[in-house]
Amino acid sequence: MQALTNRAKLVNRKPMTVVEKLYLWNIMKGMAITFRHIFMRKPTVRYPEQKRSFSAVFRGLHVLNRDEEGRERCTACGLCAVACPAEAITMEAAERLPVEENLYREEKYAAKYEINMLRCIFCGLCEEACPKDAIYLSQTFAPANYSRKGFIYNKEDLLIPHPVNDPEAFEKALGERKVQKV
Amino acid sequence: MLLAIDWWILLEKAILILAVVTVSLVIAMYATWAERKVAAVMQDRIGPNRAGPFGLFQPLADGVKLFMKEEIIPNTSSKFLFVMGPALAMITALMTSAVIPWGPTINLFGREISLQIADINIGILYVFGVVSLGVYGIMIGGWASNNKFSLLAAIRGASQMISYELAMGLALIALLMMTGSLRLSVIVTQQSEGLFNWNVMYQPLGFLIFFICALAECNRTPFDLPEAENELNFGYHQEYSSMKLGFYLFAEYINMFISGIIMSTLFFGGYDIPFVNEVAWGAHWWVGMIGFFVLMTKAVLFVLLFMWIRWTIPRFRYDQLMNLGWKGLIPLSLINMVLTAVAILLFKK
């Protein structure tokens, strides 16, 4: 039969020599290998002192975006809640009062916006569904918590810092994203 | 009315016993740490490093965990035997340390204090007797567990220990033919003249046989079928929890440490520093200390060697183990004995 590759090696079926039967020499060869491994560099990442960086498309914690003047982008349209396969997002809409024009972009805004991190599967469908570029998934790893209640993040936890009042934090939270939609 | 004996000896011996037991227990504790670290660096990872610097408080954490766990005594035939198993293992492990010379005789407070708890004239024979008693610890533990797997493992363990004790004794006979005395202090002083007087130079084959048998007596890989962590479900200490398990594991590490000490005493000169004539320094207390540390270094090197072998070689199958013991090591040690006898007669040593 034709061999598929040319890497086939003939198996050595010779009976063991006296030295091999004694096995001591083989044991010492093995011990030399383990001894060499003591001095090799260990590939362990010493978390939390060292951390590995995530890729640019890593899907971590959600962030509710603002525009350049600091107005919240989210209009509580509900497309993210519909798109979410785990039904983790809930929201309540409210109408913008004339006093609050610098807080919200459009007339409708989200008075209550909650994401249940225990249900969320971090798929990113909410980010793809949003027409206002209001929600995106950042590179922060979702932290642990002692109770179930601590995993329900409301709007204040998710909002990005104000770009006018707090520019450095805003830039840091934005990361490498560029604003695309209006 | 007090007897006319030297009462200070009681205090000396009490302090010595306390020191020896403490040292053995502390070293066994840190042997667990060393085992995990050595295993880790040989397997391209770092061992425990969270509990204190370099993970040095890890054994304390393990000890606390073992104390806090629930004590389960299964529905066995005899609760007394169940509790006695680990106790016996621990007792025999510690008892062997009584006859070892930990250092040269020192002069302290105007008295000659020998750093050996009991200098009996059948030193090595006593060690062998106690090691044979260690088999009982395993057998009782396996039997009282009321569990077929533990019983199987205990039976294997007992047969393994008995087979390898024979070869060990035979290897020692050749050594004793050369030293002429069973006393451990005499054996050590005979090797004190220098590196080339150490018994390993005269008895290399004997040392090899003794080393392999010591591995088998301590139930260390490649002879760890009684413990068989992934075959016989943990073996004879499967049903134990909390401090009884702790005692079994500790007894194993103490056995390892004491085997290392005995091998250094018998073959590697004991507390003798190579290339240095410390007899000329006199009998000060710090000479005793230095001798003690030299003995500890040799024993620690042996313990590290045991660990190195453990993480290199796979386990023996039971019939391979028995073959090696009866058909391999016993004829070899008999040949060794004959060769030594011939050499002694020829050279009249």
Image: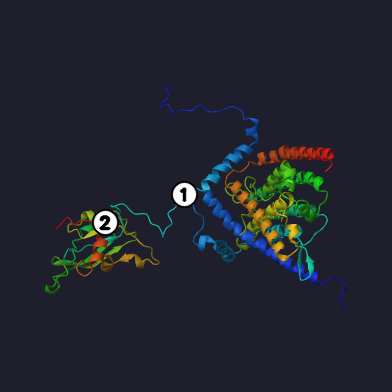
Q: Nearer the viewer, residue B322 or B48?
A: B48
- Residue B237 is situated, as x and y percent measured from the top left of the image, at 63, 55
The disc numbered 1 marks a residue on which chain? A
Q: Quadrant of the N terminus of chain B?
A: bottom right
Which percent across, then down, holds residue B20?
A: 70, 63
Residue displayed at 57% across by 42% down: A32
Q: CA distance from mark 2 to mark 1?
A: 44 Å
Residue extending farthest to the top is A1
Question: Counting residues from the N terminus, which is met first, the one under dot 2 or under dot 1?
Answer: 1
Residue B16 circle label? none
- Identify whether B210 is placed above or below B285: above
Q: Is residue B220 left or right of residue A43?
A: right
Q: Secondary structure at mark 2?
A: loop
Q: Which residue is mark 1?
A: A41
Q: Amino acid at mark 2?
A: Cys
The residue carrying mark 2 is: A84
Q: Is the residue A112 above or below the residue B182 in the image? A: below
Q: Nearer the viewer, mark 2 or mark 1?
A: 1
* Residue B145 visible in the displayed image: no
Mark 2, Cα crowd under 10 Å, few <14 / some 14-19 / many 20+, is: many
Work out which quarter of the rendered image holds the C terminus of chain B and state it. top right
Q: Is residue B321 left or right of residue A13?
A: right
Instruction: Report helix, strand or loop for mark 1.
Output: loop
- The x and y percentages for residue A73 are 18, 63
Residue at x 34%, y 60% (from the top left corner): A142
Q: In the rendered view, tell whether residue B86 sits above or below residue B317.
A: below
Residue A67, position in %: x, y?
A: 17, 63
Tell me where residue A114 sits by quadrant: bottom left
